[in-house]
Image: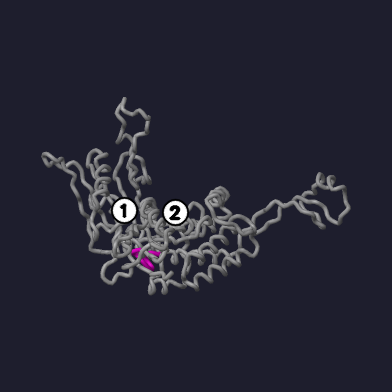
Amino acid sequence: MTVVPVTIGEWDELLPCGDSPTRGLSFRRAPAARALAARLAKSGKLEVQELLDGLSVRSRSFVGTVRLGPLQVTVRPKITGFPLAVLLRYAYELRNLSLYEQAELEITGQSFQDLVLFQLAAEATELLSRGLHRAYQPRRELLASPRGRVDFQRLAHTGGGWQPALPCHHHPRLADCLPNQVLAAGLRFGAGLTGNLELQARLRWLAALCGECVTPIRLDRHVFTRLERETSRLTRTYEPAFRLIEILYRGAGAGLSREAGELPVPGFLFDMNRFFQAVLSRFLHENLDGFQVRDEYRLQGMFAYVRGFNPRHRQAPAPRPDFVVFRDGKVAAILDAKYRDLWEKGLPPNMLYQLALYALSQGGGMRSVVLYPTLDSRACEEAVEVREPVYGAGRARVILRPVVMGQLAEIVSSPDWGTAAKRRREYARYLAFGSRIA
């Protein structure tokens, strides 16, 4: 089957009209691709629909590459190159390792997963150069030179010393431990997610170096649960690599399969909305001095079932904005992050209704803020007033506040001293409160 590659941007649409590459395509000979397209559309990750003239493609906040029968869709993030690499490291607390492919990333515009894989390769190279972590592993084996504790019970069961070795229980310090097993498995897993042959070969080479002395494993959710439980200060240098491997695992299979090995991987899709929220979370927590920032804080008491009219005894819904800023125990600001360029594409009604509820939940100023990313340095703050429909009196305000991503990348990459630290604090206060005094 001939595969037609298509590249679009986030929050974009491609229709099968004119000389569109999707004109004339269908899933008639690929029922599995039709089912996968329905699952992707239902999950809100990517919409691919069969129309009379061909396939229409509509992207959202998810970026990456996915194969659907005769169609391969690549969704590229709006922010690319060095700013994306800087903010990716900042959001997930990755080390600022040298990526020798940085110039290539700037020129060719590699896919998002390739950027993650370049960083993973750099992390693995750094770990190998330092020497892999070793941990004490329990072993029960026959040894000609006894070590540890002699297992006299086993010796009695075997009838004594009829062989030139003793059963011993000892704890050698080996590289065959869970952190190295996950690292090798993650490198092998990542090699299957890229079409860059040079990067693929590098990942497999690094996996072979890690796997020389470790038992192969398959990544699944149980491995990550166990890894989280066994992580300690001794494996702190592995944490950036583990975060990258988890990003790749969560996004692989278009984020639809429960286990990475159960189904063929149709692609990789990553939610840039979560990425944007992670960037803002770390920036506000670190630089909003004098305030307390709570992530996804539940607004209790905003909704309640009427007494006597809740026969199923359901719990009342509680909205959860992305960030609530407190000062002296009182709400100073309610912020919500939306990965959509509202300066360019406008505010959808569903987002407006959500933010209006957040604003009405407060007393006093009655306002909420949506933080959105943009590359346009001319973008400025906008305000939508929620009015009483009969008399037109203002009840609340929804503030649309732009986050210029290039500017934010420059701010977070500056050295942590002097005017740079002051500039970060000022920008954090602007994101939370705008030009008004809190």
Q: How many marks?
A: 2
Give the CA distance from mark 2 to mark 1: 23 Å
Q: Where does the image place residue 67, in percent across and percent down from the top left? A: 42, 63
User: Circle 2 sits on which residue?
Assistant: 256
Look at 49% across and 73% down and name the residue there: 197
Q: In the image, what residue occupies the spot 30% across and 58% down? A: 373
The mark nearer the N terminus, 2 or 1, is 2
Q: Is residue 83 magenta?
A: yes
Specify whether 13 is left or right of 151: left
Q: Is residue 358 magenta?
A: no
Question: Which residue is identified by label 1?
Answer: 338
Q: Which numbered disc, 2 or 1, marks the residue closer to the eye?
A: 2
Span of residues in magenta: 77-85
Q: Please say if 351 is above or below 424.
A: above
Is residue 283 visible in the rendered structure shown here?
no
Query: Can you give x and y, in whole percent of width and height, for residue 1 in the image?
Result: 43, 69
